[in-house]
Amino acid sequence: MPDASTKAAADTPAAADTRLTPGLPGYRRMSLALFAAGLATFALLYSTQALLPAVSAEFGASASAASWTVSAATGALALCVLPLSALSERFGRRPMMTVSLSVAVAVGLLVPLAPNLETLIALRAVQGAALAGVPASAMAYLAEEVRPRALVAAIGLFVAGNSIGGMSGRIVTGWVAQLWGWRAGLAAVGLLSVGCALAFRALLPKARHFTPVTLNPKALARTVKRHLADPLLVRLYVIGALFMTVFGAVYTVIGYRLVEAPFSLPQGVVGSIFLVYLVGTVSSAAAGKLVGRLGRRGALYLAVSTTAAGLLLSLADALPAVLAGLVLITAGFFAGHAVASSSVSRTAKTGRAQASALYQSAYYLGSSVGGTLGAVAFHAGGWGGTVVIGLVAVLGVVSVTLYGTHSARAEARRTAAARNGAHRRLGVAA
């Protein structure tokens, strides 16, 4: 039976009308604000990835050392997503996103001035930690302020800002760096992000449905422990991390391969390679249909097969083959990520925000590990070494998925045996 507050909410439809929906004042402003926030977040987060060969050249650093300018940012984000999501429960989603973007943008203006590689890595770690407050709060803001029937579209626009930001940041830095150097490329992304942050602050409507809660570290720890004790959630976290390991390794190292012989591409063209991300927009949107036709595990097997085929195809020393390989890797990654991340929300019955935060932590940790290992492997064995890292991660996804299939079948057999035993006992009693 519903409690008094639930009944009161049901009896006051006017209150529900204050939530945002297309056609009502504030919805367009909210959509544009979060699009700008997503664009700035991912433009900043991966701003050095397309510039790694130039960073290596200036500081005399290996690919593995320079890769830490990416891995430090994604690793810090992975560590800070969960605590910042808890802080947003106390202080509000809008203030958390505003502070996070402000700090990240301020650091972004300092990054081009880094005098050495160590300082650059440290600044990037601070930037990644600050950026963790945006994904930790944006989804919760949307869930609270947007009507349920408009929520999918609103989240889709935020995710579009993420992907376009990640892509455009790399393209902008690539072309600007070709003309004026990598520091100018990073400065351009910093200035772009200033504009996005100002637009976000000016456009985002004030929260009307946020209710602050008292911080309770013990309750948070219990929720996290409960999620980590759920075998299915843990498998989904591992799958997300392994997919991102492949993606992080490939896109951290691909610039080094393409600026070297036999390709010898200029920096601007290398940055434009990230237009391949548009393929991921299509494959992630198609993931729902794949799950409907093949089931979750079937969709994961297809995503893994596509990724593995792309890795193998990329070994060729022909640019069309490499590009085709990147298309397959990107399509497989985004499809697998979409299946795994959406499954987390469906699997977690309580504490969904913490379940999603744990997935994001695993996901970005995978990016850090993949970027670092991929660069180390490239330094030791060329592109073939990076592909081996990717294939090992792919094999890990297959193993985890097969184990999940086996566990599900074993559980079904136990349930059937228990049901049959109950029927026999009822028959004897009758």
Image (cartoon, rainbow, N blue to C red):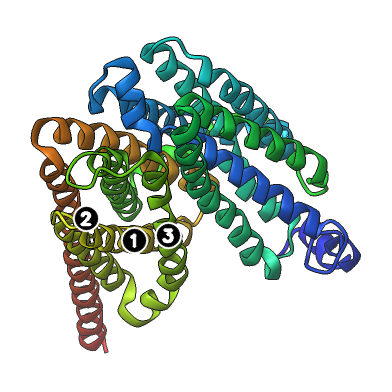
Query: Measuring 32% from the left and 16% from the top, which residue is drawn there?
Result: 59
Residue 71 rendering spot, x and y as whole percentages: 35, 30
Mark 1 — residue? Answer: 336
The answer to whether residue 167 is left or right of residue 321 is right
Mark 3 — residue? Answer: 347
Mark 2 — residue? Answer: 397
Q: Residues within 10 Å of mark 3 (few under 14, many from 20)?
A: some
Q: Residue farthest to the front? A: 179
Query: Which residue type does callout 1 highlight?
Result: Gly
Query: Which residue type does callout 2 highlight?
Result: Val
Determine whether label 1 and label 2 are within 8 Å by CB. yes
Residue 256 rendering spot, x and y as whole percentages: 26, 37
Residue 343 rendering spot, x and y as whole percentages: 41, 61
Indicate which disc, 3 or 1, sits on the residue closer to the N terminus. 1
What is the CA distance from the residue labelled 2 to the residue labelled 3? 18 Å
Q: Nearer the viewer, residue 384 or 177?
A: 177
Indicate which disc, 2 or 3, sits on the residue closer to the N terminus. 3
- Residue 105 appearing in the image: yes
Query: Measuring 55% from the left and 32% from the top, which residue is drawn there?
Result: 131
Query: Which numbered mark, 2 or 3, is in the foreground of this view?
Result: 2
Query: Would you place residue 278 above or below residue 373 in this image?
Result: below
Q: Quadrant of residue 286?
A: bottom left
Query: Would you place residue 324 above or below residue 382 in this image?
Result: below
**Helix, strand or loop for disc 2:** helix
The answer to whether residue 64 is left or right of residue 146 is left
The answer to whether residue 4 is left or right of residue 385 is right
Residue 291 rendering spot, x and y as whole percentages: 37, 74
Q: Residues within 10 Å of mark 1 (few under 14, many from 20)?
A: many
Q: Residues within 10 Å of mark 2 (few under 14, many from 20)?
A: many
The answer to whether residue 2 is left or right of residue 426 is right
Query: Which residue type does callout 3 highlight?
Result: Thr
- Residue 136 appearing in the image: no
